[in-house]
Image (spheres, helix red, strand yellow):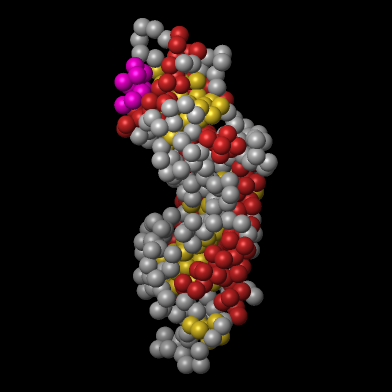
Amino acid sequence: MSREGSESGSIRTDWSFLDDALEAADAVGFVAVGGRRDDDLRYLTRFDGPEREYAFVRTAGTTRESVLCAPAGFETKATRQFDGRVATERAGDPAGERAAAILDHSEAGAASDGEPPLVLVPPTIPHDAAVYLERAGYELQSTTAVADARRIKTDSEVDAIRGVQAAAAAATRRAEAVLAAADAAADAGDDGGSELRWQDAPLTPDRLTREVNAELARHGVSDVGNTVVSVGAHRPAGDGGTCEAVSIRTNEPIRIEVTPRGPHGYHGALTRTVVVDSDGGWDRRAYVAVESALDAGLSEIEAGADAGDVAREADAELAAFGFDPTTGIELPDGPLGVGYGVGLSRRESPPLRGGTALEAGMVIAVAPGVADPEQGCVRLSALIVVTESGYERLGDDSHSFSPRA
């Protein structure tokens, strides 16, 4: 579905799935309106636009075409990045009005008479854009065609994700190297753990987060503010707060969660948990349980399998080790779930729940974990692409309970 565009190495979208949807609905066109944060729009246009709204239009008929109504000041960038026609006229008008004008001048739109012509739109189209289209005489019908297309990744998309995942692996290795090089303070606390010091200063989650993010930057990807370093039961760095005053201790589980974004907009997803000096108690038992749950979940993955079976098998394995996967703590980045899709959004379809059939080309993070309000969180993940006979693991699949130098 993807092809090379006007920028070397760029990823392009084949819009034929929209043509199929338009034909099935007997619609004259498809319109999407949004800005930089709209991942569906970025998927359709591959345009890294501004925050303000702009429009994408796919017209029906024998002369069908894709049109990007470029926002004012971004015409050159749009022409470079978008693999279709860039409309620059009326750049100051509302995006919905510009989209309606494109439809009015299209073959299918001009040929419409009698009943209001039908236009397909995403469920999340902004209200004002919908109003402009309706005022122009079009009837709107919601479609999930874009969301459905995004679930299956092309080879080019998988390659982009694989590259970002390699950077995520390098960043977690950097974190482990820092932890392995840190010194333990001479005096142990009441819990038997000691404060970690690195480069003559206490090692805190914030310091470790900065090292992770610096490594990501060295590999050409952005942390996007997503990096989480969680220590024991303390408030983690990376959730909008600060842990500068909280030192990492030798006997605490350290969860390192990295979700960087690459230059094409695709994310990676990697979670590791380590303990510098464990006493073999809760954290060790939790690690073995989560490691086994990850293997159990992965064993269920193949095209045609029910995504819910992945979660059920992982949860069953945790329960077999005496952990209740339905209890624990709420993480700052959402509930502790078994897995989710990864792509242009850090978390996207498909969810790992019953009723969703896995298909070849889906990219999924399988990430079981257990959490305790007194002990903290232990979590491991694997990022995979579903294949007909199973799955392919993307990036580094190694992990260790102890940090590696």
Write the residue at 44% across / 34% down. Answer: 54
- What is the number of callouts on the image? 0
15 and 133: which is toward the camera = 133
Image x and y of residue 389, in percent: 65, 42
In the rendered image of this protein, does residue 401 appear above or below residue 75?
A: below
Does residue 109 belong to the magenta stretch?
Answer: no
Left or right of 101, for residue 128 = left
Image x and y of residue 179, in percent: 56, 77
Picture quarter containing residue 133?
Answer: top left
Q: Pick the quarter of the image with the N terminus.
A: top right
Q: Which residues are magenta?
A: 131-143
110 and 387: which is toward the camera = 110
Image x and y of residue 145, in percent: 48, 30
Q: Pick the quarter of the image with the C terminus.
A: bottom right
320 and 367: which is toward the camera = 367
- Residue at the bottom extreme of this rendering: 187
In the rendered image of this protein, does residue 213 appear above or below residue 44?
A: below
Picture quarter containing residue 334?
Answer: bottom left
- Residue at the top extreme of this rendering: 114
